[in-house]
Image: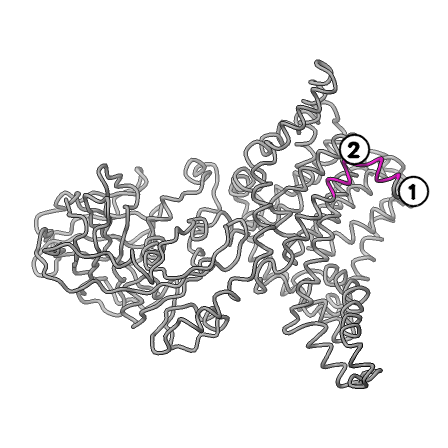
Amino acid sequence: MQVFNIVKGNKLLVAILLMAAVLRFAGTKPGYNQYHADEGITYSAATSMVRNGNLDPLRYDYPALVPLINYVFFKSVFIPVRWLQYYLSNIPQIVEGLVHIPIASLEKDKLFYVYVLGERHINALFWGRYVTAFFSLGNVFLTYLLAKKLFNKKVGLLAAFLLTFNYKHVVNSHIGLPDIYNAFFLLLSIYSVVKIWERPTKKNYLVAGLVSGLFFSIKYQFFAFIPIIVVYIFQNIKHFKNIFIAGLTAVLVFIFINPYHLLYLEKTIETVKGVSQKYGMGANQLNLFPFSYLFHVDYGPLEFVLVFIGLLMALRKFTKQSLLLLTVVIPFFFVFTFYSRGGFYVRNFITITPLLLIFTAVAIWQIGSWVKNRFGSRFEIVLYCLALPIVVFIPARNSIINSYYYTKEWEYDILRPWLSENLPADIVVATHPFDARSLNIKNKHTEFEHSGAFSLNEHKEDGATWAIIDLNWAGQPFYFWMSYGLKDISYYWNKPLNMMRNTYSGLAMEEQFRYQIYSVTKPWQAPDTHLIVAKYYDWPKVEMKEIKRFEFDDGLEEWSIYGKDKNEADKYVFDDGFGYLQGGSLVALPGVTRFPGVRISSKVVPINVGHIYKVSGYLKVESKLEPRERDGFIRVDFYGENPELEKVGIISSVSSRVYGTDDWFKKEVTERAPEGSKYMIVSFQTANSTRIKTWLDDLKIEESISRVEDVTQKPPYDLKPIDLNYVYPNSQSNL
């Protein structure tokens, strides 16, 4: 009866928590694939504790609280339930004496590893995700409690509603990473500080110290200590005993939770140093990328702007409460957007998001209060009903898509049986070594490597006729823009899609999409491996005629540079003293360009739709390059009626790059002019960072005498559109 009364009195809160629970638990299985490197901090470290009979997490890059929490849940809930399932499913065998009770020790150990934990601890992986989802739900509730405590119940409900649909909180509810726990204990810590604010007793200081010690035991972060110190200073700095109790408690909690970190202190320090280097601690360079990510993806523009409006409103009406939250928010943003490069990993902002959304809730509540005072409470309700769906539309859409598609099968598991039935045994496959193992590919396979063979022509030169493209991995060259300051905000505030598409990696990847025969993908909001199978095709050898030649004996021959910063010197110039057969060539000078994709291109060449075009030319590098250093290529773009030459064409194709020789080497591109095309241009391009000169000379364009059929329009080819957000992610791996 008491529970019923509580529910009856908090219908809106219960409804919000139910929505949050659905979004958080629905996508935990199967969720993200099982190969996230950091997910071991939850399930793998916890299972190590269970198996070894001690509390050593066996990894020291993070403190031990997250694995300890999972250990407690595993031991008290999941393992007993799994054993109960085993006994219940084997009741007939137990009755018939086929299964003996008690189970023999060796048999029990075998069952524990195979049945209880699952093969490769797969059951424990999902247990860790259930625990993470539970704490994520707790974040919604704690956000309500904190906002209610600091402001009022309406602000609490609004903040909880906003967090319910927050994209990163939903995504990371489905992956066992420490960020959700970090947010939980930060909220709990601030709530305990509010209790100190209300009643500065030794007990409340002790509780605050305990919770801040727990927070520090998640990710070695200090943010929870600041509000305790600030409140202590503003209350009565003479009562040193209180702050001493809080500090001592925090230290003792950390020691109690992390004895093995202290026992192996040298290893812990070495590991933490490595993490600090990874995070670029001490960078002291502004990074605006996380703001852009929050604006475009995680919050959406309206919710993002309301954070700042709400902050100003809160500072005016609730000054002390706002300043208390800012004692955490300001140091957090200082560390992650200036002092370190941690802002690149946008999941770090899961920790601070509940506090920011409280400010958004204040803005919405203030507007609602104004409407209520002017027009009445009914109009306030109408405002909330109309405005809230608009405010949360972008994060809610992303969250719902994520939760729904994370109920679908892992993409490796879908592709593996398809390959076993359709992959010919005698062909060579270009694939990343990790994918070859994960997909059980027995064929001879060649590398698929960013700095090695990466394009269609490079794979063909290695003998590959098929390719398996891992789009999660293929997107790694496109993180360069995810760290920028004020001077680059006009280029990178919006994802620089055109800039990325004009790089060798982008051109090479999109060229191979045209030869896909099978793909396994989810929407980008549900990050996974995203796999494409491509079958390469050699255009038929047909009679050709030469239609254009560039010998560069007398100058650039009307070639122009595209993609460059207008303030930079030209990277591509005419070299009048050096050439393939005669003096004169184009040369790419060594150095670094501000933007990738800088190239020098011919004037437009009229073409005929459906004809084959072969572009060949001679490239030379100043000194011999290793396979991992290959550079310099010829590029072909086809355009329609009004060509925008700063952008990629209707289709683009690239030659292989030069390595292994410092002699002149012939490179060529063969491609069919697609439907809708009217012109083509040819470009010479190198990487944006080069240390040697690269030359191009004697370039020739040939055209087929007759039209050639486009085989990619027929089976087995499947021209399913590929979402470019896979290849050009919105954050690291879209996570």
Image colouring: one colour
Circle nearer the N terminus (1, 2): 1
Residue identifier under label 1: 2
The residue stretch that appears in magenta:
5-17
Secondary element at image label 2: helix
Residue at the (65%, 57%) spot, across then down: 28
In front of the other: 296 or 517: 517
Q: CA distance from mark 1 to mark 2?
A: 27 Å
User: In the shown orientation, is residue 643 left or right of residue 40?
Assistant: left
Q: Which mark is residue 150?
A: 2
* Quadrant (top left/top right/bottom left/bottom right) for the N terminus: top right
Q: Main secondary structure of the magenta part?
A: helix
In front of the other: 390 or 203: 390
- Where residue 215 sits in the image (x, y, percent)? 75, 51
- Where residue 381 sits in the image (x, y, percent)? 71, 24
Secondary element at image label 1: helix
Identity of the residue furthest to the top in this view: 374
Three-letter amino acid code at the position of disc 1: Gln
Question: Relative to 719, does residue 676 appear above or below in the rendering?
Answer: above
Q: Residues within 10 Å of mark 2 (few under 14, many from 20)?
A: some
User: In the shown orientation, is residue 657 left or right of residue 721?
Assistant: left
Three-letter amino acid code at the position of disc 2: Leu
